Image (spheres, rainbow, N blue to C red):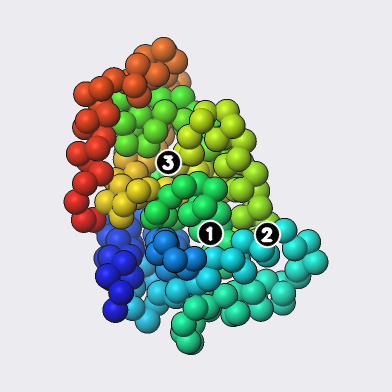
């Protein structure tokens, strides 16, 4: 099996660990770019917790990206695109979130992507607050691991329409901040982590889990005490934090 695909299954199992409460059953999906016009993505209906090579599909990027601009596609057309995008003779259909992963691997500049339905994060995203509490920071390590700013997307049914909205949001984010986000928060749905490595994706999701749990605690006892914007900017730009960020990213998941 391809080394990248093997690493993707290991990352998936880390995200799908029952004790982490990031995903259960068939929830969530992962992907990794191959640099040759194809990428690996979790197949539809497979569980992250026990993913193996039979649950990973290699997909051609071009037809997936072309579908984003085809306004004539209905549900049957979307399924046909997914079936025909397979670069290998895999019997399993790529995840319906393949379109979003393609966007994250191109517009988002990621090499690895992890999407889950983390219980802690969803407890905030499914509340009346939505993604708003994550738009400010409450402790430094979230800035170091998850980035100075996060992107937020209102609820849209998973699939092609969601991918189109994620693309729009990513383009606006890059125009505003000059870089792609490390985190996309899908309201009433869950987080997406964009990383340069499998390790970074897992780090982001674990830190998001802590961030969400701390946020929920502060919301339960009052109002979060957000760091001043200047302080958050300083943490994001400090040379020692840049070094620490680089060290955290290194190594296998």
Find the distance from the CA under tag 1 to the CA under tag 2.
10 Å
* Residue 187 lies in quadrant: top right
At 37% from the left and 81% from the top, the residue drawn is: 54
* Residue 63 lies in quadrant: bottom right
Label 1 vs 3, first from the N-terminus: 1
Label 3 vs 2, first from the N-terminus: 2
| Callout 1–callout 3 Cβ contact below 8 Å | no
The disc placed on residue 58 is: none
| Residue 9 spot, x, y in % from top left | 31, 68
Label 1 vs 2, first from the N-terminus: 2
Q: Which residue is mark 1?
A: 102
At 36% from the left and 67% from the top, the residue drawn is: 48
Tell me: 202 left or right of 125.
Answer: left
Depth check, front residue: 209 or 38: 38
Q: Which residue is mark 3?
A: 182
Tell me: 193 left or right of 49.
Answer: right
Find the distance from the CA under tag 1 to the CA under tag 3.
15 Å
């Amino acid at each position: 099996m391809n080394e990248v695909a093997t690493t993707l299954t290991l990352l998936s199992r880390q995200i799908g660990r029952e004790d982490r409460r990031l995903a259960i059953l068939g929830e969530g999906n992962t992907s990794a770019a191959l640099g040759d016009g194809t990428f690996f993505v979790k197949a539809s209906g497979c569980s992250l917790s026990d993913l193996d090579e039979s649950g990973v599909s290699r997909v051609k990027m071009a037809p997936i990206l072309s579908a984003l601009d085809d306004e004539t596609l209905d549900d049957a057309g979307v399924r046909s695109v997914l079936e025909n995008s397979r670069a290998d003779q895999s019997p399993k259909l790529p995840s319906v979130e393949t379109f979003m992963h393609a966007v994250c691997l191109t517009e988002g500049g990621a090499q690895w992507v992890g999407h889950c339905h983390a219980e802690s994060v969803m407890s905030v995203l499914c509340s009346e607050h939505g993604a708003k509490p994550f738009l400010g920071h409450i402790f430094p390590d979230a800035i170091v691991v998850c980035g100075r700013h996060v992107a937020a997307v209102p609820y849209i049914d998973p699939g092609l329409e969601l991918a189109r909205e994620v693309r729009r949001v990513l383009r606006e984010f890059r125009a505003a901040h000059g870089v792609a986000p490390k985190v996309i928060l899908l309201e009433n749905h869950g987080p997406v982590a964009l990383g340069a490595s499998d390790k970074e994706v897992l780090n982001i999701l674990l830190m998001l889990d802590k961030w969400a749990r701390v946020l929920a605690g502060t919301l339960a006892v009052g109002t979060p005490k957000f760091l001043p914007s200047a302080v958050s900017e300083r943490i994001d730009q400090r040379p020692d934090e840049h070094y620490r960020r680089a060290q955290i990213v290194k190594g296998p998941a």
